[in-house]
Each structure stands twice: as C-alpha cells, then as structure tokens.
Image (cartoon, grey):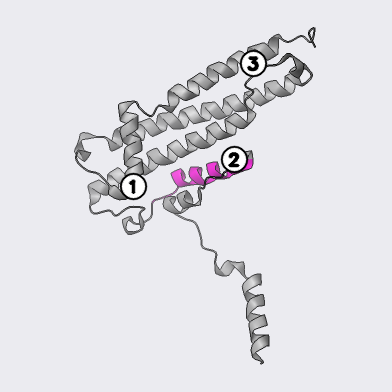
Amino acid sequence: MKPAKKLLLLLCLLLTAPSLWAYKVLYAEQWYRLYHQHLYQYPEDSMENIHYLGMALRSDFANPLNALAEIKDERQWEKYRYLFYMHVNLRLVDSYLQLGNKYNKRNAYFYNYPWKFSNLESLETAEECYRYALNFWEDAVEWSDKASDPKFAWMYIEDIQFWEDESYRIQEGDLNYGRTINRELDRLQDVRERFEAMDGSTY
C-alpha cells in the first residue's frame, strides 16, 4: 500500500473511532475535573456543571495516589475528603446562584403586565434554584466544620490551598453564602408581590 493511502486510512480510522480516546468516568475527582467556568454562563452550562458536581458528590474517591493533592497519611486523606466535599458544595452553590440569576426578575415594571404570569413562573424557578443553593451552602458549612476539627490543627494541605482558604473564610464568617442567598430570596419575594398586585389598570 502506498504511503499516501496508508496515511488516508489511518486518518479515517482516527476520525471514525473517537472511543480510542474515551475513558470511563468513575471517581469523584474525575467528575470534578469536568466542571468548568464559562465567560458567558448560559442555563445549559450551569446545568451541565451541576450534573458533573452532583456526580462528584455521589462517586467514590480515587486511590489517594490519584488525589488532587499529595496525600502523606490517613489523617491528611480524611481532611482532603472533607475539603473536597466542602469545595464541591460551594461550586454547586455558585452554579445554582448563576442559574437562579438567569430567571430572577430584578424589578416589576408596570409595562411588564402582559407577561405577568410568565414573570411569576420565572420567579418561581429562580426561587427553587436559590433554595437548592441554600441547601448546598449548609452542607458546605458542615464539611468545613469537619475539616476544621482540632485533630487537624496545624495541618495544611498546600496543593489545595484554595480549598483551605475557603474553609478558613467560612469559619471566620468572611465567606457567607447564606446571607447572600437569603437577601436574594427577600428581594425576589418583594418583586413577586409587586407582580401579583398588578391589575393592568396602569398599562
């Protein structure tokens, strides 16, 4: 077979066999690596990330040799897992907040009356997203509390410094998504009441 034909055959095989590069996603760390930030966050992007992060929470961890940080002993392994769960829950909070913001109506203008019921449905979706975010925030705080147990005193996993910093900020009260989410829920309720009060007389 001529070299050109061999090259063409090889190219065809590569293009028609994407499974050559495929691998089975089994472990929490693998699912987490699929999470990605977009410059412009569309609802489908948020839903994709929510799926990946949800699978990360439900999956087993890889062997400590394949962790996202160098693990030297069992206590580090324990703290690593607590920090991982905390961090993934925080990313779920972010994702649900971004999704909720896409459906949230910041104002109830009188000229929006013709779409009153569509706006109310949109607000309901936004509220549902914010409620989910609040649940994941509460879980993140619980995992941060576990990672901050006195038995981990003076233990700092450098490879996941950002997670360590997140936990520290939660413990200090500097990072508080609960406050942010409840503020959004209060604003949303105010806008909802204004939409519900519309009767079209000023339109």
Residue projecting furthest to the top: 201
Residue 93 is left or right of residue 175, and the answer is: right
Distance from Cα at disc 3 to Cα at disc 1: 41 Å
Q: Which residues are magenta?
A: 44-61
Residue 15 is left or right of residue 64, and the answer is: right
Q: Between 183 and 26, which is closer to the camera in this rendering?
A: 183
Residue type marked 1:
Ile
Q: Is residue 166 magenta?
A: no
Task: Identify the residue at horizontal 64%, vertical 23% (top origin).
Answer: 105
SS of the residue under disc 3: helix
**Residue ID for mark 3:** 192
SS of the residue under disc 1: helix
Q: Quadrant of residue 161?
A: top left
SS of the residue under disc 2: loop
The numbered mark at residue 160 is 1
Q: Quadrant of residue 152?
A: top left
Q: Residues within 10 Å of mark 3 (few under 14, many from 20)?
A: many
Q: With respect to residue 94, does 187 lie above or below?
A: above
Task: Identify the residue at horizontal 65%, vertical 18% (top origin).
Answer: 107
Q: Quadrant of residue 149?
A: top left
Residue 35 is left or right of residue 172, and the answer is: right
**Residue ID for mark 2:** 41
Task: Identify the residue at horizontal 73%, vertical 24% (top origin).
Answer: 118
Residue type marked 3:
Arg
Task: Identify the residue at horizontal 52%, vertical 30% (top origin).
Answer: 132
Distance from Cα at disc 2 to Cα at disc 3: 25 Å
Q: Residues within 10 Å of mark 1 (few under 14, many from 20)?
A: some
Q: With respect to residue 22, does 156 lie above or below?
A: above
